Amino acid sequence: MEDLRRQYGNLPPVDDSDLAENPIDQFKLWFQQATEIESFDWFEPNVMTLATASKSGEVSARIVLLKGVDDDGLIFFTNYDSSKGKQLAENPRAAIVMHWPMLERQVRSEGEVERVSRSYSERYFHSRPRGSQIGAAVSPQSEPIADRQTLEDMAAELERAHANQPIPLPDNWGGFRIKPFRFEFWQGQKNRLHDRFLYEKENGVWGRSRLAP
């Protein structure tokens, strides 16, 4: 492992003047560039690591998919009774990391978390493949189950119960919006002299600074 290393610097250094004043705008730009270059055959550009913590400070992290960006923040969907859902109910703050290796870029963000509206969740839920809707509806996410057949049977029963009908949005499933107060943009450079830019919101205004790598 000690010998595993690579040289960065395939893209030119980032100048402060290259960055948008609002980090959401900068994020959208980098995300769009990632979708244009990353191959969906092996990588999903909207993959992000989501870290949450309980009220007592127990920290958990897992991979989720970013499913929306608006002026207020970053949106993902989950079961509200899952481990992350319960932690966010106790402690409504989260941190995310996104990594785009082909571009040698990372984005980190931290913020407060709120649920999106039920109508927003319902609209997204019914845009998913039917099988995904059924899976989300029947899974008691993060809870122990006897075996895989249990899930298969629950999915088959729900399909039978709603044959030729829409799958209802479960009451315990929907979206969260991370409302950022901090964003960091990282781009790899030669000799580990990476570019790092930190945006922080204070009194509703975004400030920006360059950080040492």
Image (tube, rainbow, N blue to C red):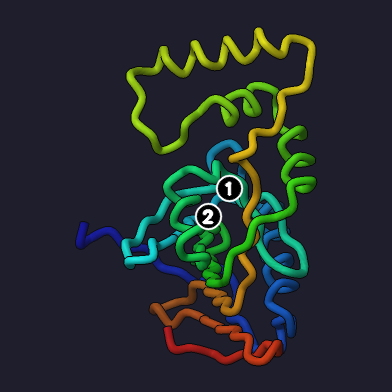
Q: Position of residue 158 (x, y in %)?
A: 62, 15
Disc 2 or 1, which lies upstream in sequence? 2
Q: Nearer the viewer, residue 69 or 161?
A: 161
With respect to residue 155, does 142 lie above or below?
below
- At 44% from the left and 56% from the top, the residue drawn is 87
Q: Position of residue 110 (x, y in %)?
A: 53, 72
Q: Position of residue 86 (x, y in %)?
A: 46, 52
- Provide the residue designation for mark 2: 48
Residue type at mark 2: give it: Met
Label 1 sits on a secondary structure element that is strand
Q: Nearer the viewer, residue 69 or 156?
A: 156
Q: Nearer the viewer, residue 176 or 105?
A: 176
- Give the left or right position of residue 95, taking residue 56 as reference: right
Are dots 2 and 1 in contact, CB under 8 Å? yes
User: How many numbered markers are drawn?
Assistant: 2
Spatial CA span between label 2 and label 1:
6 Å
Picture quarter with the C terminus: bottom left
With respect to residue 163, does 96 lie above or below?
below
**Residue 25 in which image quadrant:** bottom right
With respect to residue 202, does 189 lie above or below?
above
- At 55% from the left and 56% from the top, the residue drawn is 102
- Provide the residue designation for mark 1: 65
Q: Position of residue 212 (x, y in %)?
A: 44, 89
Q: Nearer the viewer, residue 111 or 41?
A: 111
Residue type at mark 1: give it: Leu
Label 2 sits on a secondary structure element that is strand
Disc number at residue 198? none
